[in-house]
């Protein structure tokens, strides 16, 4: 974790009171699988896929079926050259905790894994 991550975590805690926990790509995918994918119907699975893919101009967000968790994917601008990355996080509204994908550059791996988990969920259901 770099200095900017450390400072961002402190600001988030000060402003929202939420603790930030950084997750690896695999741990974040398991969290999304447990609370958004398992047992979901086809229309909700498509919404999970679209949310995980993100949106170009606004934050893509989705609440879990029990409204405890919120998945958010947003574009962030890096530097003068306007390079964009996607930031992935899950908010736990009950524990007031902020789970963030540790390395935002891993978004592609995150999305591919979520897409595969959705396909497997559909196969196992049938």
Image: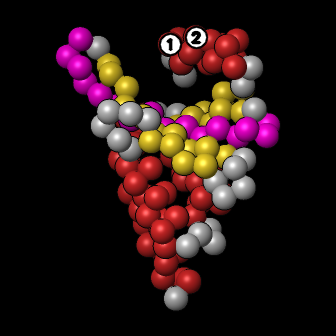
Asked whether the residues under the numbered discs 1 and 2 touch, taking CB atoms below 8 Å apart as contact, a structural biologist would say yes
The answer for how far apart the CA atoms under marks 1 and 2 are is 5 Å
Secondary structure predominantly adopted by residues drawn in magenta: strand
Q: Quick one: which residue is furthest to the right in this view?
A: 95
Look at the image and tell me in which quarter the N terminus lies.
top right
Counting from the top left corner in percent of width and height, residue 63 is at 61, 49
Residue bearing the label numbered 2: 7
Q: Which residues are magenta?
A: 80-95
Residue in the foreground of this view, choosing between 84 and 28: 84
Q: Secondary structure at mark 1?
A: helix
Residue 112 seen from this side: yes
Residue bearing the label numbered 1: 4
Counting from the top left corner in percent of width and height, residue 41 is at 55, 73
Residue in the foreground of this view, choosing between 44 and 33: 44
Position of residue 19 in the picture relative to residue 70 (left or right)? right
Q: Dot 2 surroundings within 10 Å: few (below 14), some, or many (20 or more)?
A: few
Q: Residue at x 48, y 82 (%)?
A: 123
Q: Residue at x 38, y 44 (%)?
A: 54
Residue in the foreground of this view, choosing between 85 and 42: 42
Q: Classify residue 17 by image quadrant.
A: top right
Counting from the top left corner in percent of width and height, residue 100 is at 57, 35
Would you say residue 23 sits in the magenta stretch? no
Would you say residue 85 sits in the magenta stretch? yes
On screen, 44 above or below 103? Answer: below
Residue 27 seen from this side: no
Q: Quick one: which residue is furthest to the bottom in this view?
A: 126
Q: Dot 1 surroundings within 10 Å: few (below 14), some, or many (20 or more)?
A: few
On screen, 91 above or below 31? Answer: above
Q: Secondary structure at mark 2?
A: helix
Counting from the top left corner in percent of width and height, residue 5 is at 54, 18
């Amino acid at each position: 974790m770099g200095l900017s991550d450390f400072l961002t975590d402190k600001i988030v805690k000060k402003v929202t009171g939420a603790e930030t926990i950084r997750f690896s790509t695999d741990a974040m995918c398991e969290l999304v699988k447990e609370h958004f994918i398992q047992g979901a119907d086809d229309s909700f699975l498509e919404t999970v896929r679209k949310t995980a893919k993100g949106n170009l101009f606004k934050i893509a967000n989705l609440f879990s079926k029990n409204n405890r968790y919120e998945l958010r994917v947003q574009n962030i601008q890096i530097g003068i050259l306007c390079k964009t990355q996607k930031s992935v996080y899950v908010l736990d509204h009950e524990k007031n905790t902020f789970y963030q994908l540790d390395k935002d550059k891993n978004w592609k791996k995150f999305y591919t894994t979520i897409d595969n988990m959705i396909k497997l969920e559909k196969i196992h259901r049938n």
